[in-house]
Image: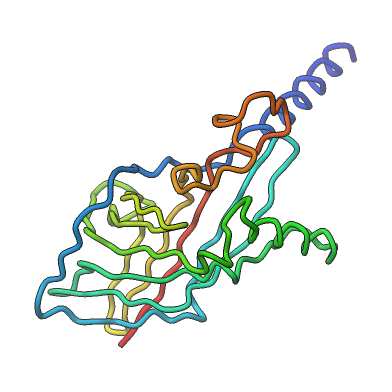
Amino acid sequence: MRNFGKVLSFIAVAAFLASCGGPQGDKAQTGEAQEVSVKSGDVTLNVDLAASNVEWIGTKPTGQHNGTISISEGNLLLANGAVVGGKFTIDMNSIVCLDLTDATDNGKLVGHLKSPDFFEVETYPTAVFEITSAEAVQGNPAATHNITGNLTMKNVTKSITFPAMVTVSDNGVTASTPAFLIDRTQWNVQYGSKTLFANLKDNFINDEISLVINLKASL
C-alpha cells in the first residue's frame, strides 16, 4: 500500500506539472515578412466562411482556455491543380471562448481578450494571413505541405511556416493544420508575459498560443 501511495503521488505531481506547461504543438517558424508574388493564370477559390475557422488555446499555470475565431473573407489560388497562394481575413471581434459555461465569466474573458491588454479589436478589428509559398512534403502523416505566409496582427507583420494537410479535388480545396504555436508577444500581445515582465510569479500567461486553421474553399 505504501508503494501504491507513492505511485498515486507521482501521478498527481505529473498531472500538476503537465497542467502548468504551455500549449501543445510544434512551434511555427517565424521570421521577417516576405514578398508576395501572384502567378498569372491562377484559379481563384472562395473560402467557405461557414466551414472555416481558427481554433485557439491559451494557457497559464492554473489552466487553459480555448475557443474559435471566424474568418470573414478569403480565397485560395490554384495553378496546375496545386495551391500556390491565397489570403484570408480573421475577424478578431468574433473571438469565442468554448470552455467557460458561466455566461458572466465567459463574457469577462472574451471582453478582456478584445481589450487593449490583448488584441485591441476596436483599433485592430481584423488579422490577415497571406500565403507566400506552399511546399509539398513527404513522410509526414499529419501534413502534405509546409505553408509559409505573412501574418498581420495589431499592425505587425511576420512570416510564419507551419504544416498543413491540403486536399485538392473537383469540389475545391480543404486544408487543416495540426496544432502549432506562435509567440503572441511578437505581435505586441504582451499582457501577462513572463518573458517581458518580471515578478509575475505564477500569475503569468504563456507567451505561446496554440492555433489550428481549418479552411474549405470552392469555385
Q: In which quarter of the image is residue 103?
A: bottom right
Q: Which residue lies furthest to the left in this view?
A: 40
Q: Residue furthest bottom?
A: 219
Name the quarter where the C terminus is drawn.
bottom left
Q: Which residue lies furthest to the top in this view?
A: 2
> Which of 72/162 is in front?
72
Count of residue discs: 0
> Which of 42/33 is in front?
33
Name the quarter where the N terminus is drawn.
top right
Coordinates of residue 135 in the picture (x, y in percent): 21, 55
How is the rendered protein coloured? rainbow
Query: Image height check: is 66 above or below 16?
Result: below
Coordinates of residue 154 in the picture (x, y in percent): 47, 57
**Residue pictured at 45% horizontal, 62% vertical:** 213
Q: Which residue lies furthest to the front in this view?
A: 123
**Residue pictured at 57% horizontal, 64% vertical:** 121
**Residue pictured at 23% horizontal, 51% vertical:** 137
Left or right of residue 5: residue 81: left
Left or right of residue 103: residue 22: left
Left or right of residue 51: residue 110: right
Query: Image height check: is 42 above or below 57?
Result: below
Coordinates of residue 54 in the picture (x, y in percent): 51, 64
Coordinates of residue 38 in the picture (x, y in percent): 15, 70
